[in-house]
Image: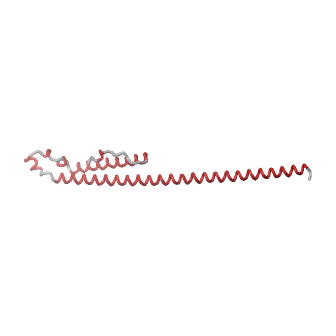
Amino acid sequence: MSWSTRILVVLVLLAGAFAAGWAGHARKAARDALQDQLAAERGARVLEAQETRRAARNADALTQDRLRSERRAADADERLRQLAASAPPAAAACAGGDAASGPAAWLLRDQDRSDLVALAREADAVTDRLRACQRELSGSAPITHKADDHL
């Protein structure tokens, strides 16, 4: 075998080794990219699951807030009805004293009492929605105030 043939064979072998190395590196790079993509996808699924659980907790808390507000409004409505029912008849109130000295529910008409309870219910609903927004934005427990007991 001549020197030129030997050099040609060595060059062909070197080119083949270079091509094999290049192909192996490309395959490893593709595998690494796929693993990174799978890890990112798993991370996104975990975050999505956490967000879903947090949204469910917030929805449950809002439901509980609304139920509590509705119960509070119904209790207030019933208390006001009972107070109004305990009012003395109009003639007795005029003859025996001032009707204004009794509870305010004695002075309110039924429609006015209903309107006040409806306004209080609406205010509680707004407060409940505000708490839900706070929970959604902060990802934690809502800020609560003692002013919620206005009924």
- Residue at 51% of width from left, 54% of height from top? 46
As drawn, is 134 to the left or to the right of 20?
left
Where residue 11 appears, as percent x and y from the top left, is 83, 49
Please report the residue visible at 86 percent of the width from the left and 50 percent of the height from the top. Answer: 8
50 sits to left or right of 143: right
Is 5 in front, or is 115? 5
Nearest the eye: 131 or 143: 143
Horizontal placement of 134 versus 81: left or right?
right
Between residues 150 and 95, which one lies in front from this camera angle?
A: 150
Q: Position of residue 32 (x, y in %)?
A: 64, 52
- Marker count (numbered): 0
Residue positioned most to the right: 2
Name which residue lies at 40% across and 46% down: 134
Give the percent coordinates (x, y) of residue 12. 83, 51
In the rendered image, the residue lying farthest to the left is 95
* Residue 82 picture location, percent across and down: 19, 54
Nearest the camera: 101 or 94? 101
| Left or right placement of residue 133 versus residue 9 in this view | left
